[in-house]
């Protein structure tokens, strides 16, 4: 589990295919930035832009993870070099500063607006239509692994538009600063909303 409070901005330095087959995954080498690598071990979980990955190699300044083709197909930003948000998994006794985040990406959103509003930034993302029912005014959502509060929701023909406010601190300490209109982002809906929807349904689920 994670909190959606980014601990460091790292950088994917290399993306190495794990085979010639089109279904092969990749190995990422990531510069850990300011992440405390002395507290990271082989087998530990780290959220990379909101996607939970397992450390398979490490140095004092970097680490490597293997990403399956399925994960690549279901996420954005893990198939190329560039800055990424990093968060280590929660340990018992850690403060829960954001909201409960599992590190399992529910869908890929598209940035529709990223504009200054006074000292802050307004970020508008179009989420897939099937995630719209989980997005609510003043509810929580993780965007590229960052815990954010929804300010507005608007269902549209192609999906669901939601807006969030990014304070200067959030812009400064996360990779969200690199977003622009058209950028793809990883979305994870609020864990509690997921269970509430399940309880309110008829209790059946298609295989």
Image: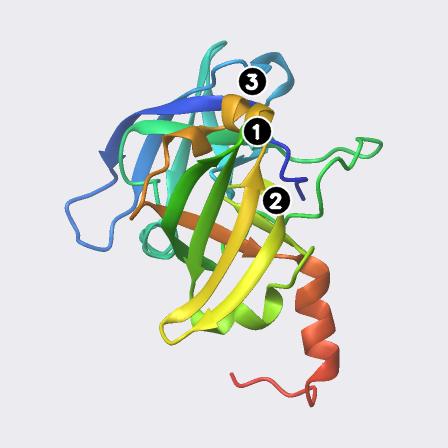
Is residue 57 or residue 165 the one in the foreground? 165
Front residue (pair 155, 105): 155
Instruction: Check if mark 1's residue and mark 2's residue have beta carbons within 8 Å.
Output: yes
Task: Find residue 35 and name its label.
Answer: 3
Residue 106 in sight from this viewpoint: no
Residue found at x 69% / y 90%: 202
- Mark 1 nearby-residue class (10 Å; few <14, some 14–19, many ≥20): some
The answer to which image quadrant residue 3 occupies is: top right
Quarter that holds the N terminus: top right
Cα distance in 3D space between marks 1 and 2: 10 Å
Quadrant for residue 138, please give it.
bottom right
Q: For this view, does 89 lie left or right of residue 16?
A: right
Q: Residue at x 37, y 49 (%)?
A: 111
Q: Which residue is mark 1?
A: 170
Colour scheme in use: rainbow
The first of marks 1 and 2 along the sequence is 2
In the picture as drawn, the residue positioned furthest to the left comes out as: 20
Disc marking residue 148: 2
Q: Percent position (x, y) of residue 191?
A: 68, 58
Q: Nearer the viewer, mark 2 or mark 3?
A: 2
**Circle on res. 102:** none
Above or below for 151 versus 207 = above
Q: Residue furthest right?
A: 93
Residue 142 visible in this rendered orientation of the protein: yes
CA distance separating discs 2 and 3: 21 Å
């Amino acid at each position: 589990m994670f909190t959606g409070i980014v601990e460091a901005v790292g950088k994917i330095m290399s993306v190495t295919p794990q085979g010639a087959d089109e279904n092969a995954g990749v190995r990422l080498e990531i510069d850990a930035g300011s992440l405390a690598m002395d507290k990271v071990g082989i087998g530990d979980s780290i959220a990379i832009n909101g996607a939970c990955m397992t450390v398979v190699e490490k140095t004092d300044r970097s680490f490597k993870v293997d990403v399956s083709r399925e994960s690549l197909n279901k996420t954005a930003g893990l198939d190329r070099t560039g800055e990424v948000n990093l968060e280590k998994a929660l340990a018992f006794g850690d403060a829960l500063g954001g909201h409960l985040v599992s590190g399992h990406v529910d869908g890929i959103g598209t940035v529709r607006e990223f504009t200054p509003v006074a000292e802050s930034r307004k970020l508008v993302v179009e989420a897939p239509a099937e995630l719209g029912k989980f997005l609510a005014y003043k509810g929580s959502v993780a965007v590229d692994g960052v815990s954010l509060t929804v300010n507005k929701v608007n269902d549209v023909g192609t999906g669901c538009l939601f807006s969030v406010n990014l304070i200067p601190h959030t812009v400064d300490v996360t990779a969200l600063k690199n977003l622009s209109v058209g950028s793809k982002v990883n979305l994870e809906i609020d864990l509690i909303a997921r269970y509430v929807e399940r309880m309110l349904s008829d209790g059946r689920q298609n295989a």
